[in-house]
Amino acid sequence: MVIIDENVENFIHVHPISDKSTEFQTHFDKPGLYKLWAEFKFDGEVIVYPYVMKVR
């Protein structure tokens, strides 16, 4: 997963914390809006899911 802040000043690259479940863990330095893109592979096809998240 990649994450950028609303000002496109900070970039975070995150990998799953487990091979058995879809769980990610990261730290945000400040509150605000963040855009995330998560990639998953299903039957050999890579699908990207975009999200917008508000961190308080």
Image (cartoon, grey):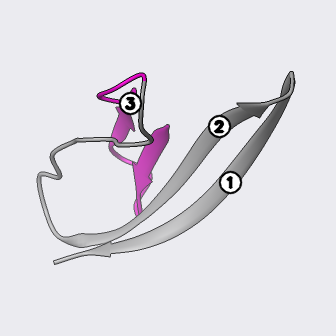
Q: CA distance from mark 1 to mark 3?
A: 15 Å
Type of amino acid under label 1: Tyr
Type of amino acid under label 2: Glu
- Horizontally, residue 31 falls left or right of residue 41, namely left
Q: Secondary structure at mark 1?
A: strand
Q: Which residue is mark 3?
A: 16
> Closer to us: mark 1 or mark 3?
3
Q: CA distance from mark 2 to mark 1?
A: 6 Å
Instruction: Please tell me whether residue 18 is drawn above or below residue 5 in the rendered image.
Output: above
Q: Earlier in the sequence, mark 1 or mark 3?
A: 3
Instruction: Please tell me whether residue 4 is drawn above or below residue 50 in the rendered image.
Output: above
Q: Which residue is mark 1?
A: 49
Residues at badges 1 and 3 in contact (C-beta under 8 Å)? no
Q: Earlier in the sequence, mark 3 or mark 2?
A: 3
**Residue 19 versus residue 16: which sits nearer the camera?**
19
Near mark 2 (Cα within 10 A), the count class, few <14, some 14-19 or many ≥20, is few
Near mark 3 (Cα within 10 A), the count class, few <14, some 14-19 or many ≥20, is few
**Residue 36 versus residue 5: which sits nearer the camera?**
36
Type of amino acid under label 3: Pro
Residues at badges 2 and 1 in contact (C-beta under 8 Å)? yes
Q: Percent from the top left, x then y, of residue 51?
A: 56, 65
Q: Is residue 31 magenta?
A: no
Q: Percent from the top left, x then y, of residue 38?
A: 58, 44
Q: Is residue 7 magenta?
A: yes
Q: Residue at x 44, y 42 (%)?
A: 22
- Horizontally, residue 26 falls left or right of residue 30, namely right
- Horizontally, residue 43 falls left or right of residue 38, namely right
Magenta segment boundaries in residue numbering: 1-19
Q: Residue at x 33, y 26 (%)?
A: 18
Image quadrant in which the C terminus is located: bottom left
Q: Which residue is mark 2?
A: 39
Q: Percent from the top left, x then y, of residue 36?
A: 51, 53
